[in-house]
Image (spheres, rainbow, N blue to C red):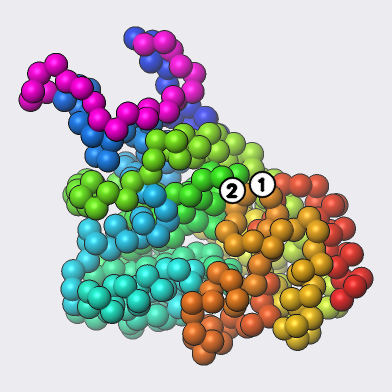
Amino acid sequence: MKQETRAVTVGEEPDYTNCGDVVMPVHLASTYARQKVGVPTGGHEYSRTDNPTRQAMERKMAALENAGYALAYASGLAAETSLILSLIKTGDHIVAFNDLYGGTRRLFLEVFTRNYGVEFSFVDATDPGNMDKAIRPDTAMIWLETPTNPLLKLCDIRAISKIARAEECLLVVDNTFMSPFFQTPLDLGADISLHSTTKYINGHCDSVGGCIMLSDRGIYEKLKFVQNAAGAVLSPFESYLVMRGAKTLPLRMRAHEANAMKLAAYLDHRPEVRVVHYPGLATHPQHSLARRQMSGFGGMISFELDTDLERSMGFVERMKLFKIAESLGGVESLIEFPAVMTHASIPPEKRREIGLSDSLIRISVGVESPDDLIGDFEQAFDRL
């Protein structure tokens, strides 16, 4: 089946032995009765371990990523935490892209390095050779975001997967910015694809969740054990919301991309804009890679105004349709300052090191009329 069909049908198959629900119902039971002591009814014992709604949602997520398995968690960071707890031990080394979501970097250094002795090296993964050089005998994992948050840098998943395989490291790709509709890392050689389902997969800014997709049965069993043992699972109602949102993922992603292309081109020609970061622009330094490994360019843009921080903040505060808010991937257009919002936990010197200036602005382009969105920028530029 094509992505559009899988998004609608997988996990939503009617149960004709019951009442034939067209939509997977929300199973709110915390525990399940059984007729015989040693035989769980339908394999269900307790909702932390398994819940019918969450299982259906996980099936849909696996289908979208061309994966054998998926596991759903209470947030994207809960998924990351469970992933490392499941597969990494004290003293292991992880090589990571130096341009990562601020919450991921904080989790790595302030939790896993400080409390559990896991070592991290942050390198520029736009050059696969840098990843190769950073690998040590104790390296257990390579961690990528592509495109990155917030500078929209890309890394060659296929090339780095060959390095990971040769060095016997697991390759994890945070695929949140592209969604499974525009990029499927497992098909490019990654071992694990990870998402904050809060973003594009849910798509309506009304659910927080995370998901891990993979095809290796042995790794899945380790992750499943910790998912149950640690318990940071997605609730039945949140699972229902993600399933509902995922049905329109292909439609929304096309609209996000179409609007983002128009806005990126518009911003690229404004004299007040110093630089625009969007992989769909031919001027993006990795545009050719984007065309090779992605089927679309997504709805995320970041840019810098040719002015100081105070005026840049004033510009953002004058936006009317774009709401000043963290997060991304919803039908609503959002705008934010990474240095003081999503990436404030990263020290200033580290932000400068990766090219994240204090005046960088990030926008999540929604599905409103592109004319209205450009008009919103027009009125803000007129008052800059």
Q: Earlier in the sequence, mark 2 or mark 1?
A: 2
Q: Quadrant of residue 277?
A: bottom right
Callout 2, which amino acid? Cys
Q: Residue at x 31, y 73 (%)?
A: 111
- Looking at the picture, tell me which residue is in the foreground, 232 or 276: 232
The residue that label 2 is drawn on is 205
Vertical position of residue 329 compared to residue 355: above or below: above
Vertical position of residue 12 compared to residue 232: above or below: above
Q: Report helix, strand or loop for mark 1.
A: loop
Question: Is residue 84 shown left or right of residue 380?
Answer: left
Q: Determine crowd level at label 1: few under 14, some 14-19, many 20+ residues with C-alpha closer than 10 A.
A: many
Q: Quadrant of residue 355?
A: bottom right
Magenta includes 36? yes
The span shown in magenta is 18-39
Q: Residue at x 23, y 34 (%)?
A: 46
- Residue 353 placed where, x, y %? 52, 87
Badges 2 and 1: C-beta atoms under 8 Å apart? Answer: yes
The residue that label 1 is drawn on is 331
Question: Is residue 359 shown left or right of residue 193?
Answer: right
Callout 1, which amino acid? Val
Q: Quadrant of residue 62?
A: top left
- Residue 23 placed where, x, y %? 49, 23
- Residue 286 placed where, x, y %? 59, 70
Residue at the far right in the pictured view: 382
Can the viewer see residue 188? no
Question: Is residue 58 shown left or right of residue 264?
Answer: left
Vertical position of residue 193 compared to residue 167: above or below: above
Q: Residue at x 42, y 68 (%)?
A: 104
